[in-house]
Image (cartoon, helix red, strand yellow):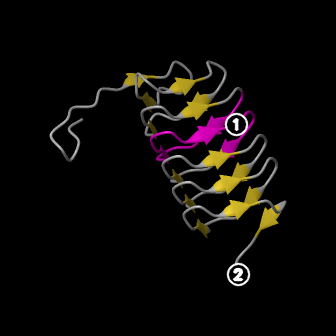
Amino acid sequence: MELEKGEVSKYRRHENGRGLVSPSAKVNPSAYVSSATYVESDAQIGPESWIGQGSWIEHGAIIGARVFVGANVHVGADAIVGNAARLASHTNIGRGAFIADGAVIDHEIQVPEFTDVSARSTGRA
């Protein structure tokens, strides 16, 4: 894949789910990464996490252990998603955001850049 500056980025298929993973990303072998999902450079995905179809995990993002990421979710660069968090489908986690352990982000929620979501559940405001 060619990036905006003319750089070429190559991906490998994750064995569990066949998602596209940058060679510099760290994805635990027990994590599931759906086939139409991208995990960018320096991102990390913890054990037993599930990343849904069409999701995009940007550069440097960290997904903890046992995290559920629904379909078509965008996790911005350098965002952190804590252990056992749940991100429902069609959500957008902004760059540098922090999602606490066990937090639940409802369907179609937009979490702004650098926001700290420490609550157990977030709904529509």
Q: Where is residue 9 in the image (x, y as percent from the top left)?
A: 27, 31
Along the line of sight, the residue nearer the viewer: 87 or 43: 43
Q: Relative to 110, is 12 above or below? A: above
- 3D distance between C-alphas at marks 2 and 1: 26 Å
Label 2 Cα crowd, 10 Å radius (few <14 / some 14-19 / many 20+): few
Q: Which mark is residue 125?
A: 2
Q: Give the range drawn in magenta.
A: 48-68
Q: Relative to 121, is 36 above or below? A: above
Disc 1 target residue: 64
Q: Residue 98 carries which label?
A: none
Amino acid, disc 2: Ala
Q: Where is residue 19 in the image (x, y as percent from the top left)?
A: 46, 31
Residue extending furthest toward the left: 6
Q: Relative to 13, is 96 above or below? A: below
Q: Position of residue 96 (x, y in %)?
A: 56, 54
Label count reads: 2
Query: Quick check: 98 left or right of 85?
Result: left
Q: Where does the C terminus fall, quadrant-wise?
A: bottom right
x 43%, y 24%: residue: 24
Q: In which quarter of the image is residue 122?
A: bottom right
Label 2 SS = loop
55 is within the stretch colored magenta: yes
Query: Quick check: 18 left or right of 9?
Result: right
x 61%, y 18%: residue: 29
Q: Quadrant of residue 93?
A: bottom right
Q: In which quarter of the image is residue 82?
A: top right
x 69%, y 44%: residue: 68
Label 1 SS = loop
Q: Relative to 81, is 38 above or below? A: above
